[in-house]
Amino acid sequence: MSGHNKWSTIKRKKGALDAKRSAMFSRIAKEIAVAVKEGGPDPDGNPRLRTAIQNAKGVSMPKDNIERAISKSAGDGVNYQEITFEGYAPGGVAVFIECLTDNNNRTVASIRSIFNKRNGNLGTNGSLSFLFDRKGVFTIPVPDGKDVDEFQMELIEAGADDFDDVVEDEEEGTKSLVAYTSMEGFAAFQKQLDSLGIVATNASLQRIPNNMKELPTSDGVSVLKMIEAFEEDDDVQAVYHNLEVTEEMEAQME
């Protein structure tokens, strides 16, 4: 299942790193808020909150920020509603958008406006369900000195059913595996990792396209700009699409 990074939710382009980090922190704080409202402020008894905290640590979110988000949500914090949107970008590229919002009308108007301005079409919920599979996606550091193939076998025994390419961080000198599970197997795999003392830097349920759409470079760049506009909306948590992103498209987005 190589190519995961081509359509993952948050692009890490050069420049504006502080803004990107701030956006990630904001998204995670909202996820913490929803998790606390859903299952309480104790991560030991709240798997969703435990995952959100784990993801916060994975992007180096300060401990004070995490604790403040939990405390605020446990009180009279904002109540967020989870809503989704489905539609098509130019060229027939499928787009699935997940939001957390405290103002439904504002979010609907904003998403519709982006579709209209970028020559897309907002569809009805469920219209794209056949184009995406919901899977658990885990980014797991390979322990120092551990053989990658051997570690992969351990993860398969724990419940992983597919892998992406090995991700190498040359600056840090580390390697990570991107492991996939079924949606139903997400919680069980997380529990198995906990029992093995393996800490993922990110764990989430994502919508994986089951086929990709190829477009000429200029058309693809137009779609990526549309995706970027969605991602810059404060109410948007994640954007998934099935565009086959090429190096030429990425170069023009830098």
Image (spheres, helix red, strand yellow):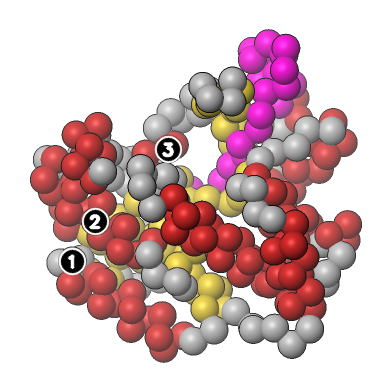
Q: Which residue is mark 3?
A: 5
Along the polypeptide, which appears first: circle 1 or circle 3? Answer: 3
Assess whether residue 141 is covered by the magenta stretch.
yes
Please give left or right for residue 148 compared with residue 9 in the image.
right
- Residue at 69%, 55% (x, y): give it: 62
Please give left or right for residue 144 compared with residue 59 in the image.
right
Residue flagged by tag 1: what amino acid is it?
Arg
Please give left or right for residue 112 compared with residue 164 in the image.
left
State whether residue 249 is above or below residue 112. Answer: above
- Can residue 131 be seen by looking at this rendering? no
Along the polypeptide, which appears first: circle 2 or circle 3? Answer: 3
Do labels 1 and 3 touch, CB within 8 Å?
A: no
Where in the figure is residue 234, as x and y percent of width and height? 45, 71
Do labels 1 and 2 touch, CB within 8 Å?
A: yes
- Can residue 108 be seen by looking at this rendering? yes
- Residue at 71%, 70% (x, y): give it: 69
Residue flagged by tag 3: what amino acid is it?
Asn
Helix, strand or loop at label 3? It is helix
What numbered label is drawn on residue 131? none
Label 1 or label 2, whichever lies nearer to me, is: 2
Where in the figure is residue 188, as x and y percent of width and height? 77, 44
Q: Which residue is mark 2?
A: 225
Residue flagged by tag 2: what amino acid is it?
Lys
